[in-house]
Image (spheres, grey):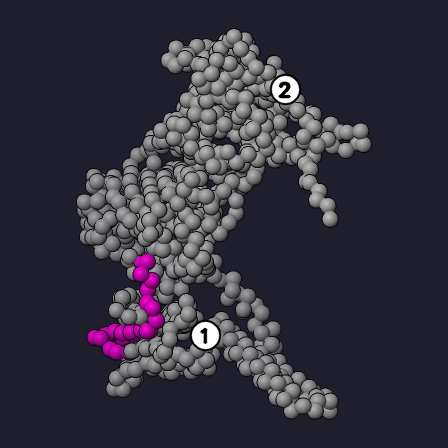
Amino acid sequence: MSKIPFTVSARTARLIGRENVANAEGALIELIKNCYDADSDNSIILIDRTQNQIIIFDMGDGMNNKIIREQWMTIGTDDKLYNATTTSGRIKSGAKGIGRFALDRLGNKCTMLTFPKNKNLGYRWKVDWGHFEVKDGTGKNVKINDVYAELYTISKTSYLDSIKKAIDNEPFREILTKINDKEPITHGTALIISDIRDDWKKESIEKVFSTLELLNPPEGAKKMNIWLLDADDPLQYGLVENDNFKDYDYKLTATYKKNKDFNINIDIHRNEFDYNLIPKKLFEYPDMHEFPFDEETFITEHFKIKRTFFQLLKGYKDEKNLAENIGDFTFTFYFLKNTFTKDDRAKFYYKEFLGSRSKWLEKFGGIKLYRDEFRVRPYGEMNTQSYDWLMLGERFGVNPAAFSRKGSRVRPNQVAGIIKFSRIDNPYLEDKSNREGIQDSDTFDLFKNILIGIIKVQEDDRSTIGFNLDKLFGDLNEDEKNITDSEKIADENENENETQEETKSKNETLKKGVKARDKKIKDQEDELATSRAMASAGIMISSFSHEFHGLRNNLISRVSLLEGKIKKVVNESVNDPSDLRKIDREIEKFHSQDQKLKQWIDFAIGLTKKDRRKNKKINLVDYFNNFKDTWDENLFKERNINFKFDFDQNDKNLLNTNISELDLDTIFDNLITNSIEAFTKNGGIIGNRNIDVHLSIEKRQIKIKYCDNGPGIDNAYININDILKPFETSKTDDLGNQIGTGLGMWLIKSAVDSNKGKMLLTKPKKGFQVEFWLKKIN
């Protein structure tokens, strides 16, 4: 046996550099990060198209002979991985040891001038990247060990003089002079990239400047001054300033310091509503009694709350211990609506806002990631697929309701955000090798879901206020009364003797009625938008009901026919009785499964029948008898569920209400489904599984009390009524992704409301309980 070494083609450098760095902009960012990692307080970038070169200057620690040879010249060095902190305490942004190959992406040649700290000499390093593509005598690429850079010692001159001699650009020199007047330039590194590969047009430089404005997080301590200069247009750019977010409707700051309880501290500033304009009747509504919606909190506009990962991701069970992988981070989230109408301001008491938010969002919008004070691209990058990397647009598309409905969601063009973390605290959130984003992993998926959970805190806060302001508007303007009064006027016969004052009064009433009706229609349209998301399943069932009937009929007979044919063949060829018993058992399984399919097809077809949609007199005792029989046959017996309902026998013929079977099924099919899932998830309920329905009469109403002995409403719900919001679910997978529709309880509430009923959720010591009241009829 012989041992043979691996060899690396010099072409690898091209793959790592020119072809692995996505674009020139990304390559520049990589090299600026090197300035930061060198503890430089200043960095200057000069793009000189006339001289066909790019200059990147810093005044960091510089490099000595040993560092150049053993680290700069070593591909994939792990120095930054193990020496992750700079002398001043910065966390180094690089760790893979390949960032220097970004030089190849920018130009064909590079000269580096570097003067190490506390030394009296410097070094000139030169490379021609074209040498990495040279062929040897056999026509193959040369090995990387056969490619050399040139290294010279520089003595009897200073770093500043060397730079001024090498770079003949007056604006560049002026900045050097200003910096030197404050702090002598004695050490650092300058890269002179020549024979540049890209055509640096005005638009390209403008884009780089915009990127640099977002390179460091807004509102963070500015740790390095960056200048960008265009030699052809010296007055156009200059010092890159950080832009703070000042004009917003909401600011939410979530801070996580790793702890055993996974607590996140959340600080919210409501800056959208003008308390001085809001009628104080608002704070009489039930939602607005309690913190953080109470009047005192509304006045201060700021409040703090605490949430755990598991309250943000209701129902999430951390079976893989992924939460342990997530270290310290802060998430600053801004919500900014782009515009509003005069009518909106009158209804929701908005504050005025400054200037054009749309233009500001075009530049600074999107949610951006920062690792160790440097941007991780391309997250939040305008006009790219990664702009909406948290899929906020998709969430809004599923639930496009206005913010006056609870549970409404933000749109991606209304938000900006900054997520800051350190690679020291979050080793599981690693760069991709091309520095274009974080590696896909279960930990990153969970992290994204936590961020969405934090955004939902703001959404729920704003939509709760919007819902109650909308209700207040309706109450103050007597919407229902105006609709009724306008309908009466519309039904009146014309009166020739009507006075001018009477006509004017009626016109005013009609105007109010039209506005109130429009508002009511808009609310109904919002609800319909959500309902449409569910309608396709019902349409499909209805469209293919003929085919389903055919399947159903085949299910009744196909196993019997198959059994007869199989036994005819088997009896003639099988001698072992045990083999016959095995065949019988398999046929019995087929029969049992076909019976279930038949029952579910009958159930699905029945849902779409037209007569079930009409309101009619229904005796609830008869309804629940049939309901029990249907579910017993399908699921209760098989899953060991004991379903019972009781009532006073004297009331049997009095328990009548006017409602459609479809609405009753919507209420109780969804409740049963939730109970069954609660009984069976996470190992299931051991012992009896009970569902109880009690019917009684209270004055002129029928009270229906529904209970089960499952685990009840998830403890993550601080307000149990939140489960009634559309798309609210505690069903998640092992990464925190929602897997339930979140529509079941909302549909129940909608069905009750549409029949003028009432619904009350309570949280007993054990299990789940909800009560309904429907109008009793004779």
The numbered disc on residue 611 is: 1
C-alpha separation, residue under disc 1 versus residue under disc 2:
88 Å
Q: Nearer the viewer, residue 194 or 144?
A: 144
- Magenta stretch containing residue 707, yes or no? yes
Residue at 49% across / 42% down in the picture? 430
Q: Is residue 529 visible?
A: no
Q: Point out residue 410 in the picture as x, y percentages from the top left corner.
A: 40, 46
Residue at 54% across / 21% down in the picture? 65
Q: Point out residue 668 in the picture as x, y percentages from the top left corner.
A: 38, 72
Residue at 63% across / 19% down in the picture? 150
Give the class, few, some or many, for how many residues have Cα within 10 Å of label 2's Cα (few <14, many ≥20): few
Q: Nearer the viewer, residue 177 or 81?
A: 81
Q: Nearer the viewer, residue 544 or 105?
A: 105
Residue topped by disc 2:
150
> Judging from the image, what secondary structure is the residue with disc 1 in?
helix
Please say if 686 is above or below 214: below
